Amino acid sequence: MKRAAILLSLISAASVANAANYPYIECEDLKMDIEEHGTSDLNGLTFTSIDTLDRMTVPKIEFSFGSNVYIELNDRKQYKMFDVVKEGNKYSFTTTKEKNNLGIYVDRKNAFAFEITDLGNGEYTFQMFKARYEGDYTDKKVVWVPYNKFVQGDDFETPVRYAVDESSIDARNEFKCEN
């Protein structure tokens, strides 16, 4: 009896570990996510910091599988992705979309922008910006300024260098939705 319980717990633990590498997403849900958020080359990738400057950085960044639903920072904070744009070797997106009639993002605490540059050979730079507003009270314009909590140290304006985790490329390529 004890052997059966141990065997069942090992099997369930192995399936949970596998689920982290290959998430379960129903095809119908994935289709809706793609319609709402789109797709990009970043989907399913994991990046690890290789920054050499003397500062604290986010050690790991992950993107959702199959669509541009979210970016996750160090397994702790998830942000939705809106308006993903790729121009040449640069990607950019915001983490909120809805603005009020004054031109200010409704979700002010989570109004960020990301800029990601592909340097080649699996290396990228990431930069995170927070929204600052300029202009008249009734006509605000968003100005994106470097976010000093994404990188901690004297130099928070220089983009952070990251490398693609090779296993995430394999996981992304093997990813399939479930019916």
Image (cartoon, rainbow, N blue to C red):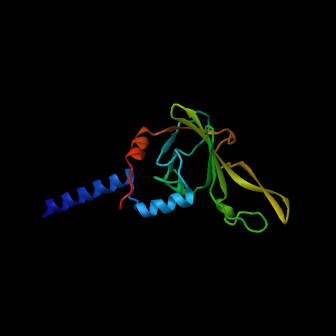
Where residue 129 sits in the image (x, y, percent)?
68, 50
Front in this rendered view, residue 32 or 100: 32
Q: Quadrant of residue 28?
A: bottom left
Quarter where residue 9 is shown: bottom left
Q: In which quadrant will I find the C terminus?
A: bottom left
Q: Hey, which residue is sitting farthest left in the picture? A: 1
Image position of 68 (left or right of 133): left
Q: Residue at x 24, y 56 (%)?
A: 11
Q: Can residue 151 be seen by looking at this rendering? A: no
Q: From what the image shows, is residue 40 above or below residue 162?
A: below
Name the residue rendered at 46%, 59% in the picture: 30
Using residue 137 as the reference point, say whether residue 75 is left or right of it.
Answer: left
Residue found farthest to the right: 136
Query: Can you give x and y, in whole percent of width and height, for residue 157 in the image?
Result: 70, 41
- Image location (x, y in percent) of residue 104: 75, 63
Image quadrant containing the N terminus = bottom left
* Residue furthest top as drawn: 121
Residue under the image location 46 percent in, 48 percent down:
44
- The number of numbered badges drawn on the structure is 0
Position of residue 20 measured from the top left corner of the image (x, y, whole percent)? 38, 53
In the displayed structure image, the side of residue 3 where residue 123 appears, left or right: right
Which residue does the image show at 57% across and 37% down from the upper left?
A: 124
Report whether residue 120 is seen: yes
